[in-house]
Amino acid sequence: MRRLPMMLCLLALLIPTGSANALTPSEQQSIKLIRDAYGERAGLRVEAWRQLLKDIRQDDEMRLLEQVNDFFNQLRFLDDIEIWGKEDYWATPLEFLGVGAGDCEEFSIAKYFSLRELGMDDEKLRLVYVKALELNQFHMVLAYYPTPSAVPLLLDNLTPDIVVVSQRPDLQPIFSFNGSKLWLIKLQGKGELAGDASQIKQWNDLRSRFSGQQLAQPIIRLNE
């Protein structure tokens, strides 16, 4: 298992009390909730995440992409059935960090919510369902459009590098969505608008659970 570096995990603990970057009481409460549900190491992962978002908030967009991508790509890949006992469970970022593992949806969704919290425009982001041709399986990545007509950059847990879509011929797009809209087929470009993202049941369920800080219990306890 790939672990978060201890310096990153303990970063929040090293910020002096009263610092402008100190965690708020609300954030501390969320961390306690995670610690009670998933254990001490889970609390440290969430604390490191919250501190990261504070520390990089003023950075440019490319730096935000790199930092968020690197942070979550340190977590472990594991199928939903092994963690939650379900074939297609979309865990919230808090559940993902709590367990310390997830599949491609968890990686992409956690990156999406992090970038949105950092102030990135929803129009610049797409959660993209693709067919990973070399693996012969469905997969999810996060696409970033610097401008509406730009060729997007892809954030993917399968590779540490953020690259333009033209460098990923192994991915065949199926549909994409963000906080409000759903598009069909095209990855390079806007695609054909197909309706509202609320048509996706897993997305609705996830957003509801995340806003209410609801936490599911995994069927296994990972050895941390």
Image (spheres, grey):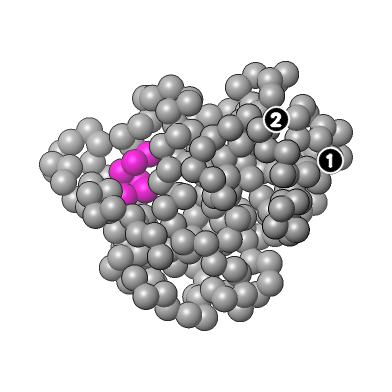
Q: Which residue is located at x 63 percent, y 45 percent?
A: 141
Q: Which residue is located at x 70 percent, y 30 percent?
A: 166
> Any mark on residue 184, and which?
1
Q: Is residue 108 on the magenta stretch? A: no
Q: In screen coordinates, is 92 left or right of 54?
A: right
Magenta range: 47-53
Picture coordinates of residue 135, whole percent (x, y): 70, 57
Q: Which residue is located at x 28 percent, y 53 percent?
A: 5
Residue extending furthest toward the front:
134
Task: Give the residue at mark 2.
Answer: 166
Q: Kindly report the distance in space between the C-alpha atoms of the residues bearing marks 2 and 1.
A: 18 Å
Residue extending furthest toward the bottom:
219
First in sequence: mark 2 or mark 1? 2
Looking at this view, is 122 or 74 the one in front? Answer: 74
Q: In screen coordinates, is 211 left or right of 135?
A: left
Looking at this view, is 129 or 25 the one in front? Answer: 129
- Residue 203, picture quadrant: bottom right
Three-letter residue code for mark 1 = Leu
Residue 25 visible? The answer is no
Assign the magenta stretch its main secondary structure: helix
Task: Specify the quadrant that holds the C terminus.
Answer: bottom left
Residue 12 sits above or below residue 38 on the image = above
Three-letter residue code for mark 2 = Ser
Picture coordinates of residue 218, whole percent (x, y): 50, 76
Q: Secondary structure at mark 2?
A: helix
Picture coordinates of residue 206, whole percent (x, y): 61, 58
